[in-house]
Amino acid sequence: MASAEFRDDDAERTAQTLAHMWWSSRLRERRFVAVVQQARAITKARISAGQVVSGEPGQRRAMPYCLAVLQALLPSKRVDG
């Protein structure tokens, strides 16, 4: 992930969160990485558009935002019954 780019304050926790998200998504590694890159691109675009406001301009702390975008992009588990 882009810990430095999004000014992550706990890269180890983020790595654990990503591992959990990957495991829970049941996606193959290549597909998960593609979704992570998509979340990164969306987050960068939203930072540029001023939609991410945590931190000072040029110093946005956007990792939680990026993780939320990633979670929204991942397939949700549905239980049919």
Image: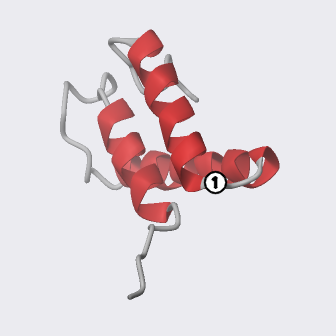
Q: Residue at x 46, y 11 (%)?
A: 12
Q: Residue at x 64, y 47 (%)?
A: 37
Q: What element does badge 1 sit on?
A: loop
The furthest residue to the bottom = 81
Query: Can you give x and y, in whole percent of width and height, for residue 57 in the image?
Result: 25, 30
Query: Can you give x and y, in whole percent of width and height, for residue 38 in the image?
Result: 60, 55
Which residue is identified by label 1? 26
Answer above or below: position of 12 versus 61: above
Q: In terms of image quadrants, where is residue 11?
A: top left
Q: Residue at x 42, y 75 (%)?
A: 78
Chosen colour scheme = secondary structure
Q: Residues within 10 Å of mark 1 (few under 14, many from 20)?
A: few
Please name the amino acid that badge 1 sits on.
Arg
The furthest residue to the front = 81
* Total numbered labels placed on residues in the image: 1
Q: In terms of image quadrants, where is residue 59?
A: top left
Residue 73 as seen in the image, left or right of residue 63: right
Task: Work out whether residue 14 or residue 51 is closer to the camera in this orientation and state it.
Answer: 14
Answer above or below: position of 81 versus 77: below
The furthest residue to the right = 30
